Structures are given as C-alpha cells and as structure tokens.
Image: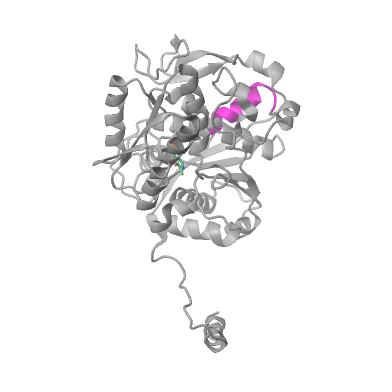
Amino acid sequence: MGYVSGLKCRECGREYPVDPIYVCEFCFGPLEVVYDYKRIKRVLTRKNIEKREKNLWRYKELLPINGEPQVGLQSGFTPLVKADNLARELGVRELYIKDDTVVHPTLSFKDRVVAVALTKAKEFGFDTVACASTGNLAHSVSAHGAKAGFKRFVFIPATLEQSKIVASLVYEPNLVAVDGNYDEVNRLCSEIANKYKWAFVNINIRPFYAEGSKTQGFEIIEQLGWEAPDNVVVPCASGSLLTKVWKAFKEFKEIGILKELGTKVFAAQATGCSPIAAAIKQGTDVIRPVKPNTVAKSLAIGNPADGFYASQVVKATNGYGEDVSDEEIIDGIKLLARTEGIFSETAGGVTIATTKKLIEQGRIGRNETTVVCITGNGLKTQEALTGHTAEVHYIKPNLGAFEETLNKIQSAR
Ligand SMILES: *Cc1c(COP(=O)(O)O)cnc(C)c1O
C-alpha cells in the first residue's frame, strides 16, 4: 500500500484517481501525483532511509507505487563528488558533481524515471512499454524493459548518433526511427498512445515516470548531510528533471527531513535549443517553441512539455537560465574530464559550461555551495568530440621512438 492520494491537474486543481492518464479532461493541464505527507512524515525518517539499500527506492514512500519496487533495483544512489579541482578552476569555494554518468545500468539519469514508470506499468497490468526518446530514454526503456519482461516499442529521431542507436538495439526492442525531430516523434507517439493500450512512459505514464527524477534531488540532500545546497544547476530538455529536483527538496522540507531550504535553481540549455532559458532571460512566461540545432541531442526538445513549470521554479527560487554554444559544450565536457576525471555526454557539457557562465556573471556566488547535475555518460556521445581531442602519439615499438616522442611532448610544455 502506497502513500499516493491521487492525481491532480497542475492548472485547475481538479482531482483524479490513480490511472494511466496524464491530462486534465477539463482544461488539458498536465496531471501531477499528490501524496499524503502527513502519513509519510510518520514513517520516513533520516534514520530509516540510512538503513536501506543504496538504490533509488530508499525513498519509496515518496514515489508513486503501491507495492514493492519491481524495476531498477540497481539504479540510483549515484556519487555526489566534491569537485575541488573544478572548483579551483572556476574560482568557487564549494562545488559538487551529482554524477549520474555511473552506477545506472544504462549510464544516464533516465534509469531513475524508467524504474518508476515500469514498476507502475506492471502495477497497471500493461504488457507493452514504449517511449519517444532523444536517446537515453531509449536505452533505459530497452534495457529495464528487457529485464522486467515487457514487449518494447522505442521511437527515436532517425538522426540520432549511431552509438546511441546501437546501445538501444542490443537489448532487442522494436526500434522505430522516425524521419523527423524529437517533437515530431513525440507528436506521432501521442497518436499511437491513443490507439494502442501500451504504457508510453513519457506520455500516458508521464505523471508517474516524472516522479522518478525526484530521487536525484533526494540523494543530493542526503549526500550533503541532510542539507540543501545554495545553488543547483540542472540541464533541461522537457524541463521535467528541474521541476522534480525542486519538488524533492520541497518534499523533504515538508516532511521535516530538511530543516532549511533556500536553494536557487538554475536551468542549463544549449543555445541551439534553449526555449526555457530564453523565456527566463526575457522575463516572459511564454515558452516559444524552437527547431533544435545542437550537438546536445539528448536535450534537443524544441517544445518542452514542462518548460513553463521549469521557468516558474527558476523564477520562484531566484535562479536563472543560461545557454551555451556547441563550442562551449565541447569545452565543458573536456573541462570536467580534465579536472575531475568524469566523462559526461554532451548534456553534461551544457551543464558545466552554463555553470561557468553563471559564476562569471556573479549569479552563482564564489562562497556558496553549488551542485551541478551531470546526467549522462560520455561514451554515449563520443562522436561529438571527433576533431576536438588531443592527438594520439603513434610510434614504432622501440625505445628510441618513444624517447623521441617524449622529447617532443616535453618541449611542447
Ligand atoms: C532526458 C535528459 C535530461 C533532462 O530531461 P528533462 O526532459 O528536462 O527531464 C538531461 N540530461 C540527459 C542526459 C537526458 O537524457
């Protein structure tokens, strides 16, 4: 038995029972999961959490399931790395990397949302799961769906990186590459979802799926010793992760696990697809859809479903939204690798480069504590670095050849 009291429209507040539905029938607003915090408060304490397995289900009372977790038992509780080298380079006192490039079976934060979505799909009795993906979700649904015994239909834009396609196909889903961008894939999937009784994790299961992102927020608080950071920088595609990291912080405050909360939430986007950052910069509530053109394909959603709500969180917390060029993204990937030994995918380059910019602008204070959310592993998007990495030293297999090269390396310093 879970702690969910129902679904509620984020716009008009109308309430619904727990079903695989996602929009309000009256105003078409998105539905959100509502919990009984009074009951949760009685059972979910710091002590209880600390005793549990180190995976994302250690916060299960604040996740929308009824029974026991069924998917993702090896996902979550990724490291929070104190990034002293990077902090020094950027000129700030305290910087942490929430490192979702590791631990997760498919090496991105999407394993969080899919763990929750597929557990819920089981509870609803679906035998087929599906998704519209910019890449990482495809991996996650393909892999976790395989383990959980679902039939899988995965829809991607046909232009996705080859390495991302292979990393889905290996799990043998039905992979459908659509001749169009993500927003077109998503529109097609909404039509399919209306016709076929499948659990589309980011369409009809979306209210439950999205809750999985909160686990990143819960972990940040726990790993900081049950304190909230001054700043958190979150990459945005649909904007969902950002809203849920904030929801997690607020929920921990609500149930008394967190004493003080004054975090500023910052949105990071690629300039080639920055509808959320643009709205924040212009001080408008209107998210103007764009046609994505960026190397950061996992963030390339031109018409972000949660863009408005993400911009509202940023506004309410006195954060900001920034965007960075493809060149800055590559530099960001390299900076993180060079200073912290962490290889992130292009989305991480976006977040690091945006953080750098926000520090330079004085929006992130040099004496404050900042957490940067790095959401996917660099092995997924190696193509992006072609022509941007240092050279390989090719030599013949003898000592003379090596020492000749060594001389060259040392004199180049
Ligand atoms: C999906 C994704 C995000 C953010 O997604 P939202 O739609 O904003 O929740 C961030 N980083 C990576 C690597 C992703 O795959």
Q: Residue 238: percent from the left, percent from the top? A: 40, 35
* Residue found 45% across the figure and 50% down from its top: 350
Q: Which residues are magenta?
A: 245-257
Above or below, 387 relative to 36: below
Question: Which residue occupies 39% across, 63% down?
Answer: 386
Q: Is residue 314 visible?
A: no
Q: Nearer the viewer, residue 289 or 147?
A: 147
* Quarter-of-image position of residue 214: top right
Q: Is residue 31 left or right of residue 287?
A: right
Which quarter of the picture shows residue 369? top right
Say which of 204 and 87 sits in front: 204
Residue 31 visible to an observer of this rendering: yes
As displayed, is residue 181 above or below residue 316?
Answer: below
Whether residue 12 is in magenta: the answer is: no
The residue nearer to you, when weighing 164 against 14, is 164
Q: Position of residue 176 (x, y in %)?
A: 30, 38
